[in-house]
Image (tube, grey):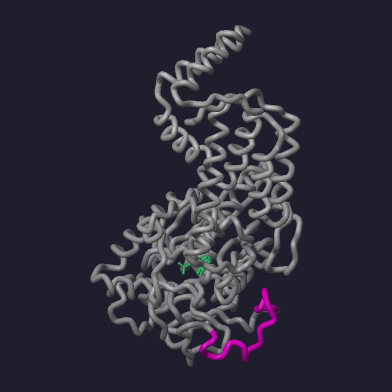
Amino acid sequence: MNIYNTLTHRTEEFVPNVAGKVSMYTCGPTVYHYAHIGNLRSYIMEDVLEKYLRYDGYDVKRVMNITDVGHLTSDGDTGDDKMLKGAKREHKTVMEIARFYTEAFFDDCKKLNIKTPDVVVPATECIDDFIRVISSLLEKGYAYEAGGNIYFDTSKLKEYYVFHNFSEEDLEVGVREGVEEDKNKKNKADFVLWFTKSKFDSQELKWDSPWGVGYPGWHIECSCISMKNLGEYLDIHCGGVDNIFPHHTNEIAQSEAYTGHKWCNYWFHVHHLNTNCGKMSKSKGEFLTVSLLESKNYDPMVYRFFCLLSHYRKSLVFSYENLDNAKTAYGKLVSRIAALMNTSAGAVDSAEFDRLKRSFKAAMDDDLNTSNAITALYNVLKADVTAATKLALIEDFDKVLSLGLIEAAKKLSASKAEDIPDEILQLAEERSRARKAKDFALADSLRDRISQLGYVIEETRQGTKISKK
Ligand code: AMP
Ligand code: ZN
């Protein structure tokens, strides 16, 4: 498989550290509010990546954190704490907010057929691990104490801006939303590993540490949770493009300073879902959630389909018009599969199965080109092969695409089948038996009887089809 690597700015062949095994880490949600459908675009595409690696035969172990502490809008002690903001908004405790929105996140994932990673770890459960790694960074001279906080010293690294050639000037205050200057830092790019002097008097979650009572910075959690569960050599790390800097840059700085060697080989970043007005937001404009889409009569599968129609490395514009187009296309696709199910299947032609599967794999091997993979699916429907071959391929591709195609088609045919009276279904069954017994006179008379009752029975290339006249 070839995959674009943000670290090298190239599409490269994916080769894991250990043959046949993949360690995969995903930055999880900050659970202070519902996920918007932009966040979920990232998780859908990461889910496709994980499923494709499994489909390709890899034994994947995927780990994700839950950010329930430490995600500030600033790296200094001056930004807003997102969790605290959520708790204030809803007059609840931070842990109540974290529990509620963690559950809401996984409910949304379930609706979107996003598999839960093998290991999911809330940051608040790993405080001892953070303290251990921060202590080691201090011992090794990569961290310093200033104004009550522990900072990572980026000047100690040979190369800090590993993804881009940022200059110090690029980091002027205001580069990121809510960034304010922190006078404690030795270098502009330094970031907090542990806070003890917080401006948040009402900060509920604090832990004892060698440097005083406080709480961890955001970046340290992903380095520690990843290394704890996947070891010091990571194959692939995922997130949205906004995570490249500073979050992933800082994760690399900490992890490599701690281990003394290269940490992660492939960096997979999903580009943003935007609205016509620009960046998607939880506070400005319509707060686009899966539940909102459902309340407007959009099946979550339509949103997944909408995402898969575009490449993950292109930003995608959300509009109801675009979603309506995806809804129509998804509906037609399901109807075509349902029609296939109403025909007699025949046998699976394994040579044709392999041939058509190859074009699906070629699309996915080409940097996860889901849109071409969906074209491969349409080509299966058009192909001159038995219904059984088509259905087997659709089921196979859907292990990766997870569009619930077979299930949706079964539901649709069940609802349509109800429209065809039992008497007609029985006559059709008798006719099919007569044909098998080569009693064509009886078969013809049964077809005439069905026709008199207002139904048409046809033999298609894929089998028998019954429809109302
Ligand atoms: P957060 O809950 O803010 O930590 O974000 C969760 C995930 O969503 C991260 O991987 C972000 O990079 C990603 N993300 C944030 N905004 C968008 C967006 N508009 N489109 C796609 N992914 C996003
Ligand atoms: Zn992370």
Asked if residue 165 lies in the magenta stretch, the reply is yes
- 81 vs 379, left or right, is left
Q: Residue at x 57, y 27 (%)?
A: 343
Please state which of residues 114 and 255 is positioned toward the viewer in this rendering: 114
* Residue 394 position within the rendered picture, expressed as x and y whole percent measured from the top left: 61, 39
Q: Which residue shows up at 46% across the image and 82% down it?
A: 74
- Find the magenta span and give its range: 159-175
Q: In the rendering, at what x and y percent does residue 141 appear?
A: 59, 78
Residue situated in front as seen by the camera: 103 or 132: 103
- Residue 137 in magenta? no
Residue at the far left: name it: 91
Position of residue 378 relative to residue 242, above or below, is above
**Where residue 107 sits: x, y (%)?**
39, 52
Residue drawn at x 56%, y 64% as measured from the top left: 239
- Majority secondary structure of the magenta segment? loop
Side of 269 where 214 appears, left or right? left
Residue 371 image point, x, y percent: 64, 55
Residue 293 visible here: yes
Q: Quadrant of residue 155?
A: bottom right
The number of callouts visible is 0
Residue 135 showing in the rendered view:
no
Residue 425 vs 191, above or below: the answer is above
**Frontmost residue, 465 versus 243:** 465
292, above or below 178, in the image: above
x 33%, y 74%: residue? 84
Residue 309 left/right relative to 298: right
